[in-house]
Image (tube, helix red, strand yellow):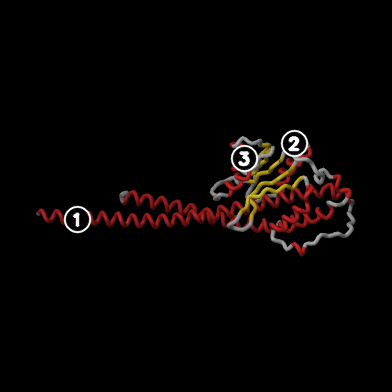
Amino acid sequence: MPSTKEIRGRIKSVKNTSQITRAMQLVAASKMKKAQDAAMSGRAYALLLAEILDSVAGQEIAQTHPLLQAREVKRRGILVIGTDKGLCGPLNGNLFKEVMAIKDDAVYVTIGKKATQFISRTKRPLMADFPLSDKVSYAEVRAIVNYMLELYEDGKIDSIEILYSAFVNTLVQEPTVMRIVPMTGIHDLLEDIKKRYKIDLSDTAGDEREMIFEPSAKEILDELPALYVKQIIFQSLLGAKASEHSARMVAMKSATDNAKNLVSDLTLEYNKARQAAITQEILEIAAATQFN
């Protein structure tokens, strides 16, 4: 049995760890609320853009846009959205399992140090990696999207896909692969977005009215697909951040609770060891008095 001094040292160490995990839990909870609000507030705009694009995709002039034209997918371009830091439970592990399941010819662009390290370690072709702040800005997203679109237009990739941890709620984050370019299945993608956001499909019937475009249909359709790509990636990044902070908060809460349970067990062990030492001393004193 360990000595009382050793047990006291372990109790002190676990309590110190508990204080650290508790502090990290509170920080993550604060960031989680802001990230969740940002992710939820951006969904309406992303859905509106998808509905507009779905409405105009059937226009004859829209079929000439390179992002709306069908293309044989020989090499996939996948944007993997990971985290910069660990201590967020199985979030990154679940995401990387999806990467391991990809057997097609693919190249990768990463966001977050963990994703970059994983892609490099597994010797998958890494085209670029981008940093991302806790407060996701549209300027950061613009640089990422422009790079992905450049690869697509140059023929280096035949699709633009996102692999990220979709935010469902505080306890559930789902690793999700979403193909956004080419936009040949925009209607199916729109229905998927509605289901993921839990929107009543009966209230969002398609608009079949004839549209008048200002300043012109060509000018609008030249910009709309790229704007849609930026918004979908931006929304995915917001969701990934909400997932990260939610997973970290839950993981740190679990660690804090486990530390408290361990302190209780160690305290019980300490009391037993102390009582055993006292009993031994009493027995030794009693034995000594018998010989005197």
Label 2 neighbour load within 10 Å: few <14, some 14-19, many 20+: some
> Residue flagged by tag 1: what amino acid is it?
Leu
Decide which of tag 3 and tag 1 comes sooner along the chain. 3
Decide which of tag 2 and tag 3 comes sooner along the chain. 3
Residue 115 point in image, percent of width and height? 61, 42
Q: Which residue in the protein does label 1 denote?
A: 283
Residue at screen point 74% across, 56% down: 191
Decide which of tag 1 and tag 2 comes sooner along the chain. 2
Examine the rendered structure and indicate whether residue 201 appears above or below residue 10.
below
Residue at screen point 85% across, 50% down: 220
Quarter holding the C terminus is bottom left
| Separation (CA) of disc 3 from disc 1 | 64 Å
Label 3 neighbour load within 10 Å: few <14, some 14-19, many 20+: many
> Residue flagged by tag 3: what amino acid is it?
Thr
Q: Nearer the viewer, residue 60 or 42?
A: 60
Residue 55 point in image, percent of width and height? 83, 55
Which of the 4 image quarters holds residue 287?
Answer: bottom left
| Separation (CA) of disc 1 from disc 2 | 83 Å
Which of the 4 image quarters holds residue 260?
Answer: bottom left
Residue 142 point in image, percent of width and height? 73, 45
252 with respect to 285 (left or right): right
256 with respect to 208 (left or right): left
Examine the rendered structure and indicate whether residue 49 appears above or below residue 76.
below
Give the SS element for disc 2: loop
| Separation (CA) of disc 2 from disc 3 | 20 Å
Q: Which residue in the protein does label 2 denote?
A: 156
86 with respect to 237 (left or right): left
